[in-house]
Amino acid sequence: MATLSDIGERELVRRINAISIEQSGHGLVLDDSVPIDGIASGGCFWATTDPGPIPCLVQVLEMGTYYHSGWLLAVKSLSDLAAMGCEPHGLLIAVEFPSTFLLEDFDEFFRGVIDCTKAHNTRLVGGNLKERSDRIHGVAFAMGSTSVHTALRRGKANPGDVLVIIDKSDMGAFWAGVAAFLNNYKCEYVHEEMLNELTTKALLPRAKIDGGRLLLEYVFPTFTMDTSDGLLSCLIELIEDNNIDIILNLDRSCFSESVVAVADACNADYRLWGIAWGNYHLLCTVSKEHMVELKKYCRDFTVIGKVTPGDGSIYLESDGSIRRILSDELLSGEQFVSDSFWKYGIDKYINLMMNTTIDQLLVYDD
């Protein structure tokens, strides 16, 4: 089978351009820089960048292909734009490949990237290819704009604010999809269409572009962040230096029927899936005064808790009691620290998701 070394860099770039035209109808700007159109008058330009593991987790599990690695690399940065309320205007991808990488996998990877941008009403505009001897590494750079000279930010939540996620269908859906796959899709009482839905959400998640735009235009949250690094990780950042506590209420109504059904079939805890990484909804805190606008303009939202005065703790309300969540070392999404899951490898994290309950991470305060 043909490899990248059989083609050469210039032909590979032309190949990406051909794939882009085939998949989206748009070619690349074959230059070192690209123009960005569509910035609204009086608005503001925003940019974000994020690396992504290649092969990705679902591909390592043989649940997906390089197509899904390309999609997941692209959606990470698009989700960051969504969390700012931005309209995306283009994506750049810089990827390093071994020369022995198969050409058909190369094509699949870029089909995933381009299909993801197309699904979010934007396009791949360019990037860079580089040869690397050991493994694949990729970074996405997304560009977008807001119609006003501001964006949704990671601001300061206030006591009394309501904790909200945009699009509950994604809540825990990634790990539900993984659990279904690990059980060979033999989940008792779970319909086939539910399993297909969860598999799609795990392999091809969508950034909440429309939700972010509505939040910016009408709701003005005090804090907004995308949850791809984990809901718990977001909450840890939210409470830092804010003199507040978070009280979560993750009952069954916060999750889709399909996520709960798979968790029940696998004897797993959907609440733990909900606070782990892998989901792509938006987390925000909304003042009680702005809940009227949220209900009016954002129909697809779910209240999952509230902000109270405190010392920076996260609590779970369950079975009539409120208990503090321990930030288990494997659940930490922060890198370059001793208690991050990055230090332990993915197998241990998967075991945690499949065989631990959130109650095992809770303690009663003295």
Image: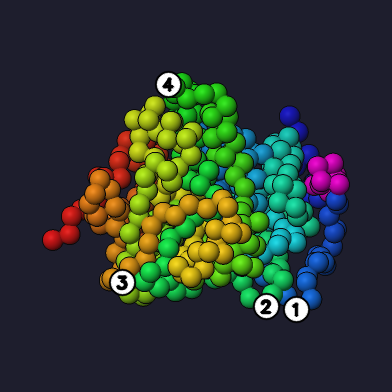
Give the mark nearest the N terminus, 2 or 4.
2
Please tell me whether mark 4 sits on a helix, a strand or a loop: loop
Is 310 drawn above or below residue 210 in the view shown?
below
Location of mark 3 (residue): 309
Give the mark nearest the N terminus, 2 or 3.
2
Please tell me whether mark 3 sits on a helix, a strand or a loop: strand
Q: Residues within 10 Å of mark 3 (few under 14, many from 20)?
A: some
Left or right, 17 with reference to 247: right
Residue 291 image point, x, y percent: 50, 64
Residue drawn at (49%, 55%) of the image: 165
CB-based contact (under 8 Å), mark 2 and mark 1: yes
Q: How far is disc 2 from disc 4 in space, using C-alphas?
A: 51 Å
Label for residue 26? none
Dot 3 amino acid type: Pro
Residue 164 image point, x, y percent: 47, 58
Label for residue 188? 4
Q: How far is disc 1 from disc 4 in space, using C-alphas?
A: 55 Å
